[in-house]
């Protein structure tokens, strides 16, 4: 995507609006938000709109507008955009649909969308096929509909490719201050990552949340991540849909493990961008990030006046990378004094109702818990219905939590287990006091996990630039197993002693030279086991000769190799291409267990040895490498070196490699190394 300065477009002092009904709504929304700049309606027939003089054309405008909302049909949109660009306008939102997203436009090769981009030239445009943007900091709107935002002095930005989702998110009542809502539409010229960078640059923006169907490009995503890290403004993304990587015509086993969703998660994690799973998660983590950025670590505390709530908190943490770390000894005396002898001191903590309604004792108890050095301290508190109940004691608890947070300078949050039990007015007050109001246990713990992961990634540093190499044009070539192993061996991968043969007699002779038992394989066959082109543990020359003759119907060449010793574990190392992430590495349980266990980890390239060791440790099958149930330990160091060798090969061959599959990689007992028993490489000639 072409990069343009978006400053005038998203923070305008003058706005031109083109069209009828939608243009009128833009003016109405600007008036409601108190936009202080100039608004110039443009219409060929109307004399005025909402008390403002109506101009006939771009040429008739008093000056080049900072921003324009173009709410006319797609053909006229192109003409107006061309005139705005020539006049020196700051940018335009293109509302019309029927460009590249339309079936008939696709059939015409995208001519209209290309024409729109050409007409814009150096002027930035957003869309087409989008609502535009709401700037709640300055009250500037290029938005043809109602919305739920109010003016704010500081807040988060939310960007999405879906105008309806943007509208829905603007209606949230969770206390989240929203500075910008932006829609990207077709991203004909300006990508959603560049929109995100433009709002990050605003000093009044604290964090960015994005709902995306696809990324602009790997380069744009890296720019966004780098700028977010530099400005210390975290970004979280809700990525929907599946990458095309899982649907490409692949021949390796790796493809069955490497779903595009897993690649997206690995890519975002490497870049230090948080990934959320739902829109509610996005809102909750944005509140947490708005009030203090990423968490320092993943240790959190929880307090509630109910054992049931404490159990819910503990159970919800299972499978998440967060820790309810034990209380420190120095916390216990103060907690005991304030809560009494009946309370079991633990984390999560059920503080019962002995101190309910007692501001001083609650403040003391919360302060003692908040002094434990936790990255986040949560107090579970569902508020009663305001139309039927009294909330005085709940407000006392709120006062105590605020006082404790201020006294200890700890990060604190009040968590309502049900979203509807956190009234908006209380959520707004908590945000003003620096206490995060959270709704939903799973969403709150997801927010803590994501905020801690961003903090950890930022602490780790940006590392090397990601591998971003396009695939060369040319003929696709499937190497024989022998050729593939030879290329990988040149990068340090250990392979069995072996040699190719052109006839059954030659295969038998080579086997005798290598020494029995041997493995015999037919060359040029992708899935040899399924095709009957693999024979193991052949003990005599006669066995080799007979087997080779039987294979001759499906192959004209053979690979004879020494048998590999019984391994501690079998793994797979593979590489495939994602449309955005490019080449990436997959490590997983190998052999016959590839599809059965679906135990794999994605490595974004280039990868350090630290990355590789951490990835191996996350595999379920890694337990075998530790000597599971008294078994032999596997050679972890040799495995890590083998993965590094494969990664080096992929990086070196990035412009030519289509896919790689080393399966199985036999991990032998500790000190005896690893051996690649089979390998597949498909690359450009």
Image (spheres, rainbow, N blue to C red):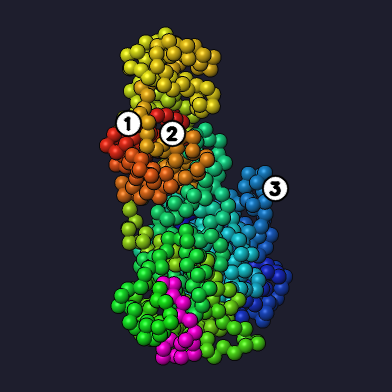
Q: Quadrant of the C terminus?
A: top left
Q: Is residue 241 left or right of residue 658?
A: right
Residue range (magenta): 347-363
* Residue at the disc numbered 3: 104
- Residue 59 in percent (x, y) is at 59, 66
Which of 23 and 225 lies nearest the eye of the viewer? Answer: 225
In the rendered view, would you say 323 is above or below 305? above
Pointer 1 or 3: first along the chain: 3
| SS label for mark 1 | loop
Q: Residue at x 58, y 78 (%)?
A: 421
In the rendered view, would you say 152 is above or below 251? below
Dot 2 alpha-carbon crowd within 10 angstroms: few under 14, some 14 to 19, many 20 or more: many
Pointer 1 or 2: first along the chain: 1
Q: Is residue 87 left or right of residue 665?
A: right
- Residue 233 in percent (x, y) is at 41, 67
Which of 98 and 677 lies nearest the eye of the viewer? Answer: 677
Dot 3 alpha-carbon crowd within 10 angstroms: few under 14, some 14 to 19, many 20 or more: few
Q: Is residue 359 magenta?
A: yes
Dot 1 alpha-carbon crowd within 10 angstroms: few under 14, some 14 to 19, many 20 or more: many
Cα distance in 3D space between marks 1 and 3: 54 Å
Q: Residue at x 56, y 49 (%)?
A: 242
Q: Residue furthest top?
A: 505
* Residue at the disc numbered 2: 663
* Residue at the disc numbered 1: 494
């Amino acid at each position: 995507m072409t990069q343009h300065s978006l400053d005038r477009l998203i923070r305008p002092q003058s706005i031109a609006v083109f069209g009828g009904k939608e243009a009128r709504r833009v003016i109405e929304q600007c008036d409601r938000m108190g936009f202080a700049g100039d608004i110039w309606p443009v219409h060929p027939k109307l004399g005025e709109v909402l008390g403002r003089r109506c101009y006939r054309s771009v040429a008739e405008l008093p000056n080049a507008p900072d921003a324009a909302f173009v709410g006319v049909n797609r053909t006229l949109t192109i003409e107006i955009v061309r005139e705005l660009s020539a006049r020196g306008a700051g940018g335009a939102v293109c509302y019309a649909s029927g460009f590249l997203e339309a079936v008939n436009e696709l059939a015409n090769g995208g001519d209209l969308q290309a024409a729109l981009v050409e007409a814009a030239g150096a002027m930035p445009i957003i869309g087409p096929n989008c609502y535009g943007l709401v700037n709640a900091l300055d009250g500037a709107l290029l938005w043809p509909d109602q919305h739920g935002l109010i003016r704010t002095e500081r807040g988060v930005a939310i960007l999405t490719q879906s105008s309806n989702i943007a509208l829905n998110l603007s209606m949230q009542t969770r206390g989240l201050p929203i500075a910008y809502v932006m829609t990207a539409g077709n991203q004909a010229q300006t990508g959603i990552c560049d929109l995100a960078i433009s709002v990050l640059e605003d000093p009044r923006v604290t964090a960015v949340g994005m709902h995306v169907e696809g990324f602009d490009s790997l380069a744009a995503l890296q720019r966004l991540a780098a700028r977010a890290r530099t400005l210390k403004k975290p970004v979280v993304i809700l990525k929907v849909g599946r990458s095309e990587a899982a649907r490409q015509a692949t021949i390796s086993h790796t493809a069955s493990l490497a779903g595009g969703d897993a690649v997206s998660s690995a890519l975002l994690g490497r870049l230090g961008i948080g990934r959320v799973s739902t829109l509610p998660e996005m809102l909750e983590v944005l509140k947490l990030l708005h009030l203090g950025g990423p968490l320092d670590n993943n240790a959190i505390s929880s307090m509630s006046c109910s054992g049931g709530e404490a159990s819910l908190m503990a159970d919800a943490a299972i499978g998440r990378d967060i820790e309810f770390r034990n209380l420190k000894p120095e916390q216990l005396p103060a907690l005991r004094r304030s809560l009494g002898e009946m309370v079991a001191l633990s984390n999560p903590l059920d503080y019962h109702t002995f101190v309910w309604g007692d501001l001083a004792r609650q403040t003391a108890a919360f302060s003692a818990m908040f002094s434990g050095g936790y990255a986040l301290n949560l107090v579970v508190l569902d508020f009663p219905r305001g139309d039927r109940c009294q909330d005085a004691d709940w407000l006392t608890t709120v006062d105590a939590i605020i006082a404790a947070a201020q006294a200890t300078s700890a990060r604190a949050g009040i968590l309502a287990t049900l979203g509807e039990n956190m009234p908006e007015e209380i959520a707004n007050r908590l945000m003003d006091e620096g206490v995060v109001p959270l709704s939903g246990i799973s969403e709150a713990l997801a927010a803590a996990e994501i905020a801690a992961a961003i903090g950890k990634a930022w602490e780790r540093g940006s590392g090397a630039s990601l591998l971003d190499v396009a695939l060369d044009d040319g003929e696709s070539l499937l190497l024989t197993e022998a050729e593939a192993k030879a290329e990988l061996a040149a990068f340090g991968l250990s392979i069995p002693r072996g040699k190719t043969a052109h006839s059954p007699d030659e295969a038998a002779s080579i086997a005798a030279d290598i020494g029995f038992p041997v493995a015999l394989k037919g060359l040029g066959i992708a899935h040899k086991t399924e095709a009957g082109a693999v024979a193991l543990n052949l003990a005599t020359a006669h066995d080799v000769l007979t087997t080779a003759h039987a294979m001759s119907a499906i192959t004209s060449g053979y690979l004879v190799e020494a048998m590999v010793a019984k391994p501690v574990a079998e793994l797979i190392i593979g590489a495939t291409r994602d449309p955005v992430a490019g080449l990436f590495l997959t490590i997983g349980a190998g052999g016959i267990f590839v599809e059965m266990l679906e135990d794999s980890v994605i490595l974004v390239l280039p990868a350090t040895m630290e990355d590789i060791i951490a990835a191996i440790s996350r595999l379920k099958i890694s337990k075998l490498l530790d000597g599971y149930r008294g078994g032999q330990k596997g050679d972890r160091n040799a495995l890590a070196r083998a993965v590094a060798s494969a990664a080096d090969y992929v990086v070196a061959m990035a412009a030519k490699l289509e896919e790689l599959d080393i399966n199985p990689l036999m991990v032998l007992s500790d000190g005896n190394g690893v051996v690649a028993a089979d390998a597949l490489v498909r690359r450009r000639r």
